[in-house]
Amino acid sequence: MSIEILEYVRKELLAHGAVRNTPEFCRSWLARSDGYLRTLRYHRLQPSMEALAVCSHKLGYYAERLRTSEDDSHKAWAERFDRLSLLCEQ
């Protein structure tokens, strides 16, 4: 189930322009190599708890920063990041 959560988070971030591609997501949001998700899919493995924790932490960090903004679009991003962070923590 965890791989599906990371795939969902990746798709959300791609769809909203927070990342440009999967390798960037793996590097910037999971602190893993470019091919991390591809390797998990190929070997039918689940992501490490550390990768999920890193992703959750980064989403939470940026949600906090965006929440302090006066811009309504930033507040919407904060809510989206909070929701994605909770998914990673489950």
Image (spheres, rainbow, N blue to C red):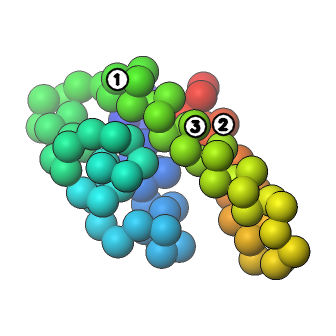
| Picture quarter with the N terminus | top left
Can residue 76 be seen at all in this image of the molecule? Answer: no
Q: Secondary structure at mark 1?
A: loop
In which image quadrant can residue 62 be found?
Answer: bottom right
Q: Nearer the viewer, mark 2 or mark 3?
A: 3
Q: Secondary structure at mark 3?
A: helix
Give the amino acid at mark 1. Ser
Q: Which mark is residue 57?
A: 3
Disc 2 packing (10 Å; few <14; some 14–19; many ≥20): few
Between discs 2 and 3, the one toward the N terminus:
3
Residue 32 x/y as whole percent: 27, 39
Instruction: Identify the residue at image location x=42%, y=55%.
Output: 10
Q: CA distance from mark 1 to mark 3?
A: 14 Å
Q: Nearer the viewer, residue 20 or 12?
A: 20
Residue 72 x/y as whole percent: 83, 76
Between discs 2 and 1, the one toward the N terminus:
1
Residue identified by numbered label 2: 86
Q: CA distance from mark 2 to mark 3?
A: 10 Å
Residue identified by numbered label 1: 48
Disc 3 packing (10 Å; few <14; some 14–19; many ≥20): some
Quick check: marks 1 and 3 in contact, CB under 8 Å?
no
